[in-house]
Amino acid sequence: MSRVADLFLNLVKYDTQSCSKSDTYPSTSKQMDFAHMLEEECRRIGLADVHVDKHGYVTANLPSNLPAGSTAPTIGFLAHMDTSEDASGKNVNPRIVKSYDGSDIPLNDKMSLTPSEFPSLNKYIGQDLIVTDGKTLLGADNKAGIAEILVAMEQLLSDPSIQHGNIRIAFTPDEEIGRGVDFFDVEAFGCAFAYTLDGGEIGEIVTESFNASQARFTITGKSVHPGTSKGVMVNASLIAGDIITAMPEDETPATTEGYEGFYHLSRIDGGVEKAELIYILRDHDIDILKKREAFVAELANNLNKKYGKDTVTVEIKEQYRNMHEILKDQPQIADIAKKAIIEAGITPIIRPIRGGTDGSRLTFMGLPCPNIFAGGHNAHGPYEYVPIPSMEAAVQVVINIAKSVGQNIRTI
């Protein structure tokens, strides 16, 4: 088994699920435990200035090995530690499918990963795949990215003939709940530009992301005994149903693609007295996203006219913005990644991501940060899988980027 696959299989043993309801940072203590494990791994492979801060950010440095008097921009590579709330990340039990033959892959006695439902599988016939047992997500989003960065640093350390400038790495918590870089110190990280390795099929480069906001509806009802409630009871959960049915049916994740945005109900909790709905609002066009925000605000206003003042409140929070607004003026950063991918014998795939990464926010925080592939598919659920050759290719792309920056500093 390759080094990157072996490390990845070790990393997914750790449950690092984040929690949107938590008010701590990181949102779960198990992410901090994982951070300290990564700290030790960074030290073991020989990285310098390894540190875990109070927020759970793991940072480390690979010093330049350029000849004396030569300089190159300091660059960075980042990946996030947490896994999604959408499926369990506890007791992940991965399995390697050797030389995938194009048939259905049984995950357990009730579930199968099938090319008819997930045609991306057809691209990987003959390759070794890592899949789940159907009970949890896999965690390739984003432990594949972590493994790839660490193995690339390990290989650069072991081969001093590959000249490179100063390289910084960082592993961040809480990306899946939109808080990944809330406390990240861009100035201290000290990079001219960086790359996240986060999801995406082999060859993918992302310089366009969604604009993203969250809308949290809180509904206040009135609970009385159902036997004597006529004309008195106000059922918060039924009002929540009004909100759900008012949302455009053809503007959901299941009905949109490409540049089409959506309203996505990501969480619902409720009873008679209280109910809460969390929607995420997405669009590549910021003006359309603002219209979505206005729509949910007006929906709450109309429901208050129907049910009474302050029955429904909605809190709209910005999560991240489309990195393209910044990266379009610095195309050389993506060009370096494109060249590195081609040198690895891979065809680059340049397309907008129907989501976002820590890089989306970091780009607006002053650290230009496109995303490159980590190799995973079907994130956030039990059908997640990752081809081992895709992870190996990502390692090579990181090395190629480091080499390119070190050898062609005049092009930066």
Image (cartoon, helix red, strand yellow):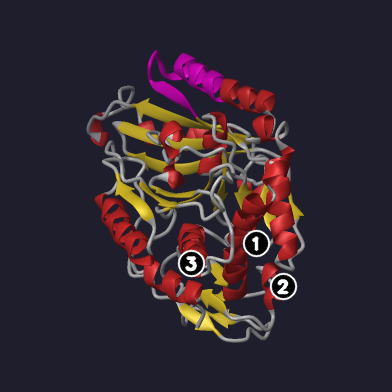
Can residue 156 be seen by looking at this rendering?
A: yes
**Circle 1/circle 2 CB separation < 8 Å:** yes
- Counting residues from the start of the chain, the first of labels 1 and 3 encountered is 3
Q: Which residue is mark 2?
A: 123
Mark-to-mark CA distance, 2 and 3:
25 Å
Is 67 rendered above or below residue 276?
below
Residue range (magenta): 296-318
Where does the image place residue 382, in percent across and percent down from the top left? 48, 66
Q: Which residue is mark 3?
A: 151
Mark-to-mark CA distance, 1 and 3:
19 Å
Is 84 rendered above or below residue 383?
above
Where does the image place residue 42, in percent across and percent down from the top left? 36, 60
- Counting residues from the start of the chain, the first of labels 2 and 3 encountered is 2
Is 213 rendered above or below residue 344?
above
Label 1 neighbour load within 10 Å: few <14, some 14-19, many 20+:
some
Q: Residue drawn at (40%, 54%), measured in percent from left and top?
A: 81
Task: Give the number of the disc on residue 201.
Answer: 1
Name the amino acid, label 2. Answer: Lys
